[in-house]
Amino acid sequence: MSTAQPPTHNTTPAPAPTPAPAAACPEHPLDLAGIGIGPFNLSLAALAHGVPSLRTAFYEQRPAFQWHSGLLVDGARVQVPFLGDLVTLADPASPWTFLNYLKAHERLFPFYLSERFHIERAEYEDYCRWVSHHLPSLHFGHQIDAVRWNHDHLLFEIDFTELDARGQALHMGRSYTRSLALGVGTEPHVPAPLCPLVDAPGVPVIHSADYLQHREQLLATGHVTVVGSGQSGAEVFLDLLRNRPPGAEGLHWLTRTPAFAPMEYSKLGLEHFTPDYTRYFHALPECVRDQLLRRQWQLYKGIAHDTMTEIHDELYRRARQGGWPDTVLTPDVTVRTAGRIADARLELHLEHRQQGTRSRHTTEAVVLATGYRERRIETLIAALDPYIRRDSRERPRIDEHHRIVLDPIVKGSIYVQNAERHSHGVGAPDLGLAAWRSAVILNSLTTEPVYALPRRTAFTTFGLPPTGPGAPVIGGHLPEQRDRLAHTST
């Protein structure tokens, strides 16, 4: 719990006043400036609000909070429990918990009776919007133009442009800060063989990130192909399946994975998303970390068990009522090349990796559920590039406090959120670790820790302790130790 006194949470927090353009002068700089306001920097802002000694400001180019709006499909759920909200796992007494959001909207008892542990994505986004409406440190409609290190003032300079509701420039400003938190998020990824489809004008090819904006068009299209086997691909396929005519579904689902694989969701498996594992992973050699990430895809790229069940149930219901549905689900397939063959048709050249066979697939629309990639933070902070220390693959080195390792000449700190999977493991993009990471960042900014964090978070012991005299024994006593203990007891 925070040692600072937060606003009372027995009543709904008062709406934040409309902020003036965020600015700070060198004589009175910010302690922390956040760039980007997604869930992770929103978490940081919410927990920082409980630390009155910190002066913070968070900037976002968009006019309001928005989170994966193209994938807020009816019934789609967040894949972490509601306790993994913006603040609870660091400060359950915060006024910005999901439970307090429910209380403010008079839905606490209905939620209690619903016995839900995983909430719908649309409700999670609404919760985040509610928090964003009440935090005075958030400045939407602010486009970041440049970030520099000022050697004279020993501060970061941030040039920004304030935008109106239409995205037009109103005026320019500058802020000074001791530390930065980059929360610029991810961006849709399109594999190279599929880029010609996206670039072709008039061809109905979209990324799943924009699915809802094109949903009606896709439902009216004769044949649709979904490419990608993760949760997004499964949710898009299920939504199309449920809303197309029985017997005329016209759906293909193609994936590179050897199977439509479930996400690892065993209790001990989930301990890979704990601070214990994050610390263990960060301490491993770089080459070992890279090998591990390639093998751990099913921890975060698989499909939720419930979603797979719903897909099979819907297919079985249609098969029982009117014969086998007009659907094809094929794993272990890669798209070699793709292109347009007519005004309303697309052709994918496929290869089945196990069989070693190739074929051509014709369709009228493609939904690319091909995932996301971390945005390159170097683009945003290009002027700071000479000061960034890098690993053998030219990625920024990130320390245990989620700070970019910089040349000692730069006295400030740059924290990253969801840009450190290479250094902190599969938990970096996980919403359930947001509050813990935010607390780690805030604790590193203050003289004394403001959030008490647990020493241990997993039953699994990742790795072995050092050997030598006095080293702890794992797994109980060895046989000779048990014999000695038995002899002593008699």
Image: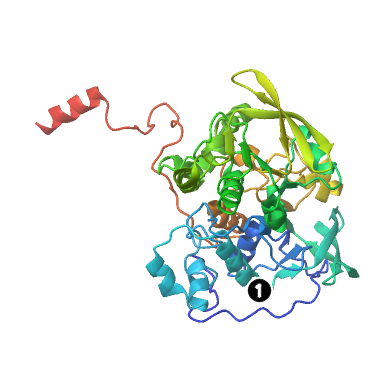
Residue 54, image x, y percentages: 66, 67
- Quadrant of the rendered structure where residue 14 is? bottom right
Q: Give me the residue at 77% from left, 66% from top.
A: 29
Residue 128, image x, y percentages: 61, 66
Label 1: state its secondary structure. helix
Q: Is residue 238 left or right of residue 183?
A: left
Residue 34, image x, y percentages: 72, 60
Q: Nearer the viewer, residue 348 or 149?
A: 348
Q: Is residue 476 left or right of residue 144?
A: left
Q: Is residue 7 visible?
A: yes
Q: Is residue 183 visible?
A: no
Kind of residue at badge 1: His
Q: Examine the rendered structure and indicate whether residue 16 appears above or below residue 277.
A: below
Q: Examine the rendered structure and indicate whether residue 365 appears above or below residue 112.
A: above
Category of crowding for the residue at label 1, using alpha-carbon neighbours closer than 10 angstroms: few (below 14), some (14–19), many (at least 20) = some
Query: Which part of the image, by quadrant, shows the C terminus?
Result: top left
- Quadrant of the rendered structure where residue 394 is? top right
What residue did someone put label 1 on?
A: 133
Q: Examine the rendered structure and indicate whether residue 201 appears above or below residue 478.
A: below
Residue 480, image x, y percentages: 23, 22
Q: Residue furthest top?
A: 356
Q: Nearer the viewer, residue 473 or 457?
A: 457
Q: Nearer the viewer, residue 71 or 165?
A: 71
The number of callouts visible is: 1
Q: Is residue 382 left or right of residue 483?
A: right
